[in-house]
Amino acid sequence: MPESRHLRPIEGIRPTPGMLALGMFAMLAGCGTSSTPDAAKAPVPVTIASAEQGPQALAMNGLGHVEGRDTAAARAQTSGVVLSISFTEGQTVRAGQPLAQIDPRPLQATIAQDEAALARDRAALANANDLVTRNAPLVDKGLVSAQQVMAYRSQSAQLSAVVAGDRATIVRDRLTLAYATIRAPITGVTGVRLVDPGNLVSPTDPTGIVTIAQIQPIAATFTLPQGAIAQIRAAMAAAGPAGLGVTALAQGSGQVLAQGHLTVIDNRIDATNGMISLKAVFPNEHKQLWPGEQINFRIALGDDVNAVTVPASALQSNPQGTYVWVVGANDTVAMRPVTSGRRFGDRIEIVHGLSGRDRVVTDGQFALSPGASVTIADKGAAKTSLRSDNPDQLGLQP
């Protein structure tokens, strides 16, 4: 009997016909050990949710930063030594409130000097006017020439201009003296103090003594794709005087921080990235927002009265497009192609492919195949037992 090509003889031992028969039987038995049909058809545990049809709030989300409604630096408008600072860092100040005092004595001395010059020039003007008054009648009598009287009048006019210049100089000096008190240009919150008493300041200083930001109300700037302009403008027109609502959300947690309204769409699109900047204003009664803070924003665009939505976890994708697993009346599943639309929080709009009565699988999809039977698992248990990376749910059981 020829040797089997699957059974190699062990050195020193030649297989007998009985041994060959036993080996063939073992091979046939091994070929017959496969998973039973009952195991292959075991229902797959999944969690499901119903597609919902009804009003959904339309919104757009963006990323931006908070900034002061108005921001201004309190600067010196005259040169001098700072004698005192009359504010504390982080203090809320009113427009016009004194913040610092520059040494006024050099400015006061300048005013005194210019007032003395004014008195001198007034006396000279009075004398010139007197000469004109006394000599003008003498022209007709031939005692004084007309040319001499014209010279007196010219001198009087020149001195009148000098006196007017002196008055203007004194006005300027008094204004400069007023600038010795540095005042808050706007109402807001002061930042870190940039100048200490004893420092010499001047109008050319690049930073000023402190920056003030108005935070009640406060503004925020954020960006959206340029394709959103038409929809936002339509929503602004529909909102009317009340303004288009904007919600400020904390990054990460999504906590609502403040409610405000959109004030302006920028007049140009950034050519480098195709984004458009928008600005919103928030009352900020409790100072939830702070200048420089990075925030997420949601713009309310109205309602879609007849939207079909499903949980975002139900939407799947493959090379052919997006789809969901739909659970039929007999608890078997079918793969249904869908067209998705906007996102509403944790739900996604289905533009085509579903109705408000369909049931869709939201967890356990990786163990499914068309026509498979499913069993509805408890949602709480599904959080641990139906993970997509669980080998027991991928058909990998031994």
Image (tube, rainbow, N blue to C red):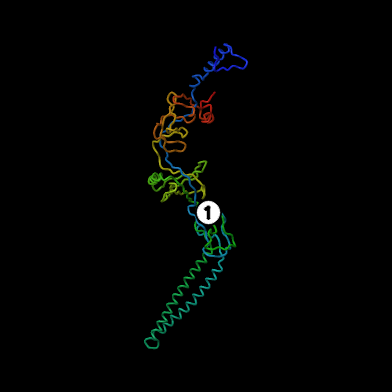
Instruction: Identify the residue under disc 1.
Output: 189
- Mark 1 crowd level (few <14, some 14–19, many ≥20, 10 Å Cα): some
Q: Is residue 243 left or right of residue 12?
A: left
Q: Is residue 258 above or below residue 50?
A: below
Residue at left offset 50%, top offset 60% = 96
Near-viewer residue (102 or 279): 279
Inspect the image, locate mark 1, and give the three-letter code of the amino acid beneath it.
Answer: Val
Q: Position of residue 331 (x, y in %)?
A: 45, 24
Q: Residue 177: x, y in percent?
A: 52, 66
Q: Element type at marker 1?
A: strand
Relative to residue 110, is residue 40 depicted above or below? above
Horizontal and vertical percent position of residue 198: 60, 62
Q: Residue 357 in the image: state x and y as whole percent.
A: 41, 29
- Which picture quadrant has residue 57? top left
| 221 vs 2, nearest the viewer | 2
* Image quarter in which the C terminus is found: top right
Image quarter (top left, top right, bottom left or bottom right) of the N terminus: top right
Please state which of residues 108 and 45 is positioned toward the viewer in this rendering. 45
